[in-house]
Amino acid sequence: MNKRIGMYSAIVTLIGVIGFAVSMLLGKDVGSYLFSLFISWGFVPMICSFSANGTKENKAAGYTAIAFSSVYAVLVGLVYFAQLTTIRLAKLNEQATAILNYKNLGSLFFNYDLFGYAFMALSTFFIAFTVEVKNKKDKWLKTLLLVHGVFAVSCIIMPMLGVFNADMKGGSIIGVLVLEFWCAYFAPICILAYQYFKKNEEN
């Protein structure tokens, strides 16, 4: 059952990543926010499945990854659900919009979103230690998960340094390109994770 949940959650996460990438290219904000929620809903059980299938020696790493993934899901969930509801449907004044609207670079919710993805990156870093390498695909999966942890540093430091702000020229385009790169990086993780769980299920 643990492995099946891992397979299904990897598929849900992959669908979310692809939907998110396509929505950004088409300029569909609602789609981007909705698929971002799907990513978090698939990611948490996927991390839990990795942890459940890990060895006893790696339980601490697995539990740490689960904790970090939960924080990620809560933070980004609050950000994107607010965009789909309050921001989209309510008539907010200029000050409230400046704080809550994710599209405003450097806004509170924009920074919360980056902070959430920092926890996602930390989660992948720790869960990588639970992956048992038995072939090249497993090695690639483990490496991609570990390297993805590096994103945590930029997600924390950039908001503190004010890299993204309302006066930034071409900020929206740069943001889209960065996120498209992330999608291209994370999609293989989902595919390899599915194959990892499927192989263990068959065994």
Image (spheres, grey):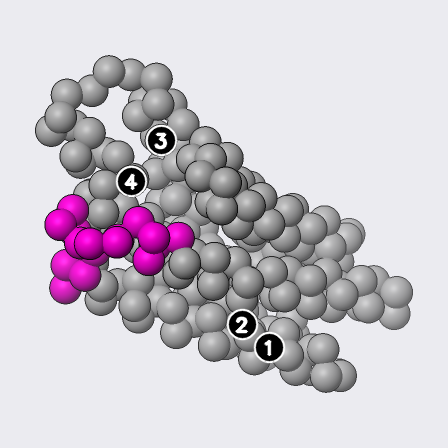
Q: Which of marks 2 and 4 is in front?
A: 4
Q: In the shown orientation, is residue 133 left or right of residue 92? A: right
Q: Name the residue under label 3.
A: 83
State the separation of the CA atoms marked 3 and 4. 9 Å
Q: Which quarter of the rendered picture does the C terminus lie within?
A: bottom right
Q: Name the residue under label 4.
A: 103
State the separation of the CA atoms marked 4 and 1. 33 Å
> Which SS class for mark 3?
helix
Rendered residue at 30%/55% (across/down):
115
Rendered residue at 52%/58% (across/down):
183
Q: What residue type is labelled 3?
A: Gln
| Quadrant of the image occupied by residue 3 | bottom right
Chain-order first, disc 2 or disc 4: 4
Q: Name the residue under label 2.
A: 145
| Start-end of magenta stretch | 160-176
Q: Indicate yes or no whether the magenta region holds residue 167.
A: yes
In the rendered image, the residue lying farthest to the right is: 202
Q: In this view, does 179 lie above or below 74?
A: below
State the separation of the CA atoms marked 2 and 4. 28 Å
Crowdedness near tag 3: few (<14), some (14–19) or many (≥20) residues, C-alpha within 10 Å: many
Q: What residue type is labelled 1?
A: Lys
| Quadrant of the image occupied by residue 46 | bottom right
Labels 1 & 2 near each other (Cβ < 8 A): yes
Q: Is residue 139 above or below residue 34?
A: below
Labels 3 & 1 near each other (Cβ < 8 A): no
Q: What residue type is labelled 2?
A: Leu
Q: In the shown orientation, is residue 78 left or right of residue 164? A: right
Q: In this view, does 147 lie above or below 172?
A: below
Q: Indicate yes or no whether the magenta region holds residue 187.
A: no
Q: Name the residue under label 1.
A: 142
Chain-order first, disc 4 or disc 1: 4
Q: Position of residue 167 (x, y in %)?
A: 13, 50
